[in-house]
Amino acid sequence: MMDIIELSSKGISDVVSIIKKRSNTLNVRKSVEEIIENVKSSGDKALRGYTLDFDKVYLESFKIEKEEIEKAYNEGDLEFIEILKESIKNIEKYHQNQKKTSYIYQKELGVFMGQRLISMDSVAIYVPGGKAAYPSSVLMNAIPAKVAGVNEIVLVTPPDKNGEVNKQILVAAKLCGINKVYKLGGAQAIAALAYGTESIENVSMIVGPGNAFVAEAKRQVYGDVGIDMVAGPSEILIVADEKANPKYIAADLMSQAEHDELASSILVTTSKRLADKVNKEIEVQVKNLSRRNIIESSLINFGKIVICKSIEECIELANLIAPEHLELLIDSPIEYLEQVKNAGSVFLGEYTPEPIGDYFGGTNHVLPTGGTARFSSPLSVDTFVKKSSFLYYSQKAVVRDGEKIIRFANEEGLTAHANSVKVRLDNEEDK
Amino acid sequence: MMDIIELSSKGISDVVSIIKKRSNTLNVRKSVEEIIENVKSSGDKALRGYTLDFDKVYLESFKIEKEEIEKAYNEGDLEFIEILKESIKNIEKYHQNQKKTSYIYQKELGVFMGQRLISMDSVAIYVPGGKAAYPSSVLMNAIPAKVAGVNEIVLVTPPDKNGEVNKQILVAAKLCGINKVYKLGGAQAIAALAYGTESIENVSMIVGPGNAFVAEAKRQVYGDVGIDMVAGPSEILIVADEKANPKYIAADLMSQAEHDELASSILVTTSKRLADKVNKEIEVQVKNLSRRNIIESSLINFGKIVICKSIEECIELANLIAPEHLELLIDSPIEYLEQVKNAGSVFLGEYTPEPIGDYFGGTNHVLPTGGTARFSSPLSVDTFVKKSSFLYYSQKAVVRDGEKIIRFANEEGLTAHANSVKVRLDNEEDK
C-alpha cells in the first residue's frame, strides 16, 4: 500500500516535503475574521446566532451547571473512570518534573537582578465536539496547567443539535478539577475567550485542538491572548532495523493514519525486506479497523517507506523531517537518542507504540506538527508560566556605571535615554 | 504636557486601552505576501531587485566578508569597545542563570520517560538599519542564543545607499562571536532566512526588531520557521509614591517616549502634587533633548498620569495594563514585587532607570509589548532551546497496562490506536 523508495540525495527533499504538502485547502480566513468581529461587537447575541447556524441548536445560556457535570460523572463507567484516574496520575507525575523556579543573581554594590516565574491567571481549553471529542485532550491540556498553578481553567466544547455535550469530556473535566465548562464551539468560542462577552470572561491563554476554523481563529486572536500552537495534521516517523517486527510497524503506522486523511506515516528502514513485509501486514490488519477508508487514503497519499543505508542515515532523515512522533524500533534505541535533534516525542523500542503516549504513559500528546519540532516544543508546564525579569541598581552602582551607560545611549542617538541616567548623576553632584 | 486623571472604575478601561490603541495603520500584508512569494520563487534575483528598490543600491553579493568586520572592529573607538565588552559580560552572566537541563523520570518495570533540551541548530538576528541601528540589539539577541548553545548565528542588516552597513553593528557582531553577516533588510531578508536562496541558507529561528514590513514578514513566515515575537511600539509604566523624585520620573517617561511617536509612557501615582511636578519637569528637560518632537507627540497622544488611592491600587492597574517596562519608584519596592503579575521587566527603586536594563545591567531588553506580558516573556535562553520528550515502555509494562490503553483508545473510537497495543499483547500469547 505504501510507496517504497531508496534514499538518494535527490529523493531527500521529496521525502521531507511530504509532510509540508498537507495544507488544508479550505480558505477560512475571511469567515473567521467576520465571526471574530461580530462576537467582539455583539457578544452573547452573536454567540447564540453562530451556535444556531453551526451547531443547529438555540442556547440561551452556555454555561454547563455543576450538577450536570456531577451527573455525567456519577453515571460514568466506573472501570473507565479508574483508567482515567491512573492516566491522570501518570501524566501529573511526569509533568511535575517540569516545574522551574524563579532566580535571583546578586552582585557587588547591592546590585541584584533575576527572573520570576508567574503562572498565567486564566486559561481556556478548547475541546472539539462530535467524533473528535477526546477525553485525553482534556487531560493533556488541563494537567500541565494545573501543575503550573493556573487558578482559573475554563473548558469549552461545542454542543450537539440537542444542546448536549460529550459526557466523557465532562467526566474528564471533573477529574481534572475543572468546574467552569461552556457549551460553545468554533471560531466564535475562540473569539469569546479572547475578548469576553456578557456571559464569558476573557482569558490570558487558549489551548487545545480544533478544526480549520478554530485553528485560524486562534491564529487571528494571537497577540491579544496567548495560544499553545496552531496544530496541523498529525504525523509519525518510524525508524526500524531489519530485526524489527513488521506487525508492530504496520499497526503503528496505521494508528497515526486513522486520525485524518491528511495524517502522514513514514517508515525509514535499512531493510527492503522489512519494507515489503510491512506493506503486506498493513493489507492484513487494515481489514479489521473501523477507520479503514481514512487509513488507506492517508497511507496512499502521505505515507512513504524509505530505504536508507544505515541507522545513522535514517535518523538524519528524521531530523530533516522533524516529525511530531518518532518511533525507534531498533537495537539499543537509547544509544541513538542523542542523534535525534528534531522530534516532538520519541518512542523507544518495540514495546512503546505511540498510543501509550497518547493515553497513559505520562508524556504529553500535544506536540509540534508539520516540521515545527525544529523550533518548537511539546505542550508542557512552561506553556502556562510566563517570565518577568527584575533589576535593582543602588545609588553607588549608578555612580560607578552611569557614564558608560550615557555613552552607550548617546552612541545610539538616544539622548533621552542618556538623560535618565544623567539626572541621577547630576543630583549626586547637587548634594 | 501629560493628561492627568483620577482613577475611577470607568476610567480603568480607558487607561488600559491606551496601549492597545497604538496600532500601526500601515496595511502591509499584501505587499509582504508578494515579497515572500517572489523570494521563494526567484531567490537571490528577487533579493537583488528588492534591495535596489528599497535600499537604493545594487548588490551582487550580500555577504559581508570577515575582513570587513575585522576592519570595522580595528577602526572602532576603543573606549566604546570596552563598554560593549563589559556590557556583554554582564548580559552573559545574567543569562547563564537561565540554562536548564534535560530530565529523566524512571518508574517500576523499567519504564522511563523524560524531556531533552536541544538548542536550535541555526538562528538569524535581524538588526534594523538607518537611525534605528542599535548595537545593543545585537547583544540582547545574540548573547542568549550563544548561552543556549546555538552553533550557527547569522546576522542580517540592511545596507545604506552606498551598500554600507552601520559599523557599530559589525563591531557588536564581532564581539558576540557572530561571523556570518549579510547586508540585507526588510521583508525580503526575512523571506530569505525562512526559505533560503542560492546564497543564503534558511535557519530554524528568526529574532530581532524591525519596521512594520519586517514585523509582518515574521508573522507570515511563522510556522515555517520560529520567531521570537511580533513586537509592537514600546511602553513604560512608572508607579511612584509622594516621595519620588519628579526629575527622575520625567526623565524616565521621556526616555521611553523618544523611541517612537507610538510609544506610551504612563505614570501611576498616589500623589497629585507629584503629578503636577512631573509635568513641569518634562517641560524643562524636554528642551535639551534631540528627539523633542517625537517625545512631545508620544506624551500628548499616548502618555497619561493616573492618580490612585494606594500603591496597591497602582500595581493593580499596572497588572491590567501589563506594561513592557515597569518602574517602581516607591519605598521598599522589593516588598511589592510579588504583587506584580504582568510586566516584561521590573525596575526597582529610584536608581534603576530603565536604560540601565537597555544597555548594561544584564537583563534582556527584548520584552513583550502591548499587554502581551499577560502571557509572554522576555527573550531568554529558553527562546533558543526546544524540548523533545521521550518514553520507554518495557514488555512487562505493556502487558500490565495494555488492556487499559486499549479501552481508552476504543472509548475514543480510535481502533487502530487500540490495535497497535493489541498486536503487542497478541504476540505475547503466541509465544
Image (cartoon, coloured by chain):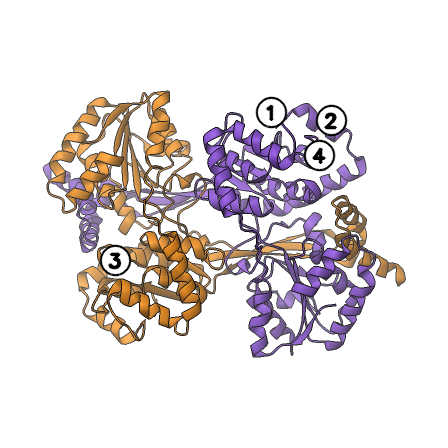
Chain colours: A purple, B orange
The percent coordinates of residue B250 (x first, y second) are: 19, 35
Q: Amino acid at mark 3?
A: Ala
Q: Earlier in the sequence, mark 4 or mark 2?
A: 2
Q: Secondary structure at mark 3?
A: loop
Marks 1/3: CA–CA distance:
54 Å
Q: Which residue is mark 3?
A: B133
Asked if badges 1 and 2 are on one and the same chain, I answer: yes
Q: Earlier in the sequence, mark 1 or mark 2?
A: 1
Q: In the orientation shown, which residue stands out farthest toward the right?
A: B430
How many neighbours does mark 1 have within 10 angstroms: few (below 14), some (14-19), or many (20 or more)? few
Q: Which residue is mark 2?
A: A71
Q: Which residue occupies the foreground of this view, B139 or B394?
A: B139
Marks 3/2: CA–CA distance:
63 Å
Question: Mark 3 and 2 residues: CB-CB less than 8 Å, in contact?
Answer: no
Q: Which residue occupies the foreground of this view, B56 or A195?
A: B56
Which of pointers 1 and 2 indicates the residue nearer the eye?
Answer: 1
Asked if badges 4 and 2 are on one and the same chain, I answer: yes
Q: Which residue is mark 1?
A: A61
Question: Relative to A20, is B338 on the left or the right?
Answer: left
